[in-house]
Amino acid sequence: MVYPIASSPQPFSQRRYLPIEDHGFIGDMHTAALVGVNGTIDWLCYPHFDSPSVFAAILDAHKGGYFTICPADEDGHRVRQMYHADTNILITRFLSPGGVGEIQDFMPVDPASEMQRAHRLVRRVRATRGTMRFRMLCAPAFDYARASHVTRLHDSCCATFHTEALSLALLAQQPLQTFDPGNGMSPGVYAEFTLNEGEETSFVLQRAGDDGSPGQPLSAGDIEQLYQQTLAYWRRWIARCTYRGRWQEVVRRSALALKLMTFEPTGALIAAPTTSLPESIGHGRNWDYRYTWIRDASFTLFALLRIGFTEEAARFMDWIEARCRESCREIGSGGSLRVLYGIDGRSDLREETLTHLEGYRGSRPVRIGNGAADQLQLDIYGELMDAIFLYNRDATPISYDLWNNLTQQLAWLAQHWQEPDDGLWEVRGGRRHFVYSKMMSWVAFDRALRIAYTRGLPVDWDGLQRARDAIFTEVMTRGWSTAKNAFTQYYGSEALDASLLLMPVVKFLGPTDPRVLGTIAAIERELVADSLVYRYNPDEAAPDGLSGREGTFSLCTFWFVEALTRAGRLDDARLILEKMFSYANHLGLYAEQIGPSGEALGNFPQAFTHLALITAIYNYNRAVEHSASWRGAH
């Protein structure tokens, strides 16, 4: 039965954009949802990370779609948000003189059971003190708000939303009514209800049956069982973390966030669960990060292996090996390794602009897909080989078949490393001879030689050594600026680039080499603002083809900590780490960038930043322990 549509209980025109940092996130390792401190789910792609969105109010507050649970009286309460300890179960609390209520948001996780395929989103609402009246509004906008849907109430507590491509069901324990969200959106459903101390109710969003049925309603006992199973899963998983040094809680929260950004069927790690959250408000620095970058490989494997997650490292290594096999099939026809891939391994990530969405706080364009997939970025071979070197040394010896594939990749690189490329930062202003790209090409050949030597594997020794040594000499001459006393962004420039803080990390030069120290000093002088690091100065660097200024890059700040740690400046490194912790949001999560007033900018949360955080903390802790041990011995 289709019920009459009521007028909106909350005029959608009154909705506002929450700051990016005012969100937590939940997921089931297939997809993830952003949950605001106001109780609104304003981002969810379904059923996978890179599927079209169902809720996208974070990209268009007027018609993007949302799922809100909040006190019916919007004034007079304070909000708090936290994770249930050592889990990815999110708790949003509303505190008022008349009562305290909370929402427990989670997606059930159990990869071994049928439950996983339901991709349920569970919202359990409780009154923990006094009395509180709540309002629930569920207004989906399928396919990035491009597809209309039919809303049906099957009984007073079950609703379905139908499109040609996807149908979802909302199972409730409260009577539902339909309403018109306005702005051309299809009907949603809402409920208002009062809970007294100790009472609870739940709302479950899941895929509808093939026949359009909503599915079997869940009892309070069913919800509690799902909750306990999910709680147990996350606590079992994080218990495998072997890190016992400083800032354990920070490392564990980052590990839990990274696990949420892992696509369980393939082991791929996405860069972020969102698209088009702006690096600069009101400008065009908006990208889709719901994919997996080859560049992240070495950082991912190092971080996972160092804190005990060998199974996740092995799954990701399997994903990398599959991409290498595919790339070798393309090399014969002039192809090469792609910069990034879909979570299922696909390479066609054609970029598209969604002109009907206004973007976060009016920051157009909203993009899906990523044109960087077709760029030439030579540094990815270095990150690939460094990842394989680490895995071969610290986990499991690589197979002969993988080695054969890698030697073909190296042969391709030996023919092309002299070419200009689009660089680490994926600029869209033309190719350059980026120093970082050359350095990482050196890493590719260096790590290959190291693996071949330790394993006795066949390789073109003379060819790889010649290429490695030629790159080293070229970088030391053409990449060095006497005027700046530093390595620069690209040959012939005077611009600095924070990526060159990784020179001692990848062992291109020693951590106290005068040229490394000179580069650190120059970056500290020109790219560091109160410990936060910009990736480059856009007024001096290679044109990136974009307008607007951007914030500081959080991963670059963690690279700065690494460089200072290796240079022996441990007090400075610790102070910067402590300051960076203050820029995390209330849940310990980081977006890609930090804006002028400390606000989060860019896609959120960002995996690369959390990987860099773990690595920086691990290496700092190791350096401090080594220093203490040395002092004790002397």
Image (cartoon, rainbow, N blue to C red):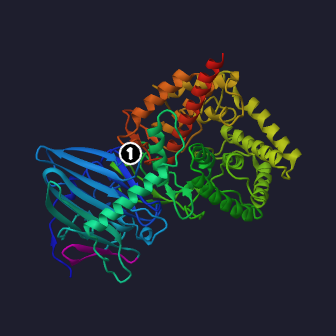
Q: Residue at x 60, y 25 (%)?
A: 520
Range of residues picked out in magenta: 150-164
In this picture, is 281 found above or below 357?
A: above
Residue 633 in sight in this render: yes
Front one among 628 and 116:
628
Q: Residue at x 26, y 65 (%)?
A: 203
Residue furthest right as drawn: 462
Horizontal relation, residue 261 to residue 90: left or right: right
Amino acid on which the number 1 mark rests in the picture = Gly
Front one among 614 and 44:
614
Residue 518 position, x and y percent, is 64, 22
Horizontal relation, residue 27 to residue 15: left or right: right
Residue 578 position, x and y percent, is 45, 29
Please tell me whether residue 472 belongs to the stretch shown in magenta.
Answer: no
Residue 424 found in image quarter:
top right
In this picture, is 89 found above or below 149?
A: above
Front one among 156 and 100:
100
Secondary structure under tag 1 reads: loop
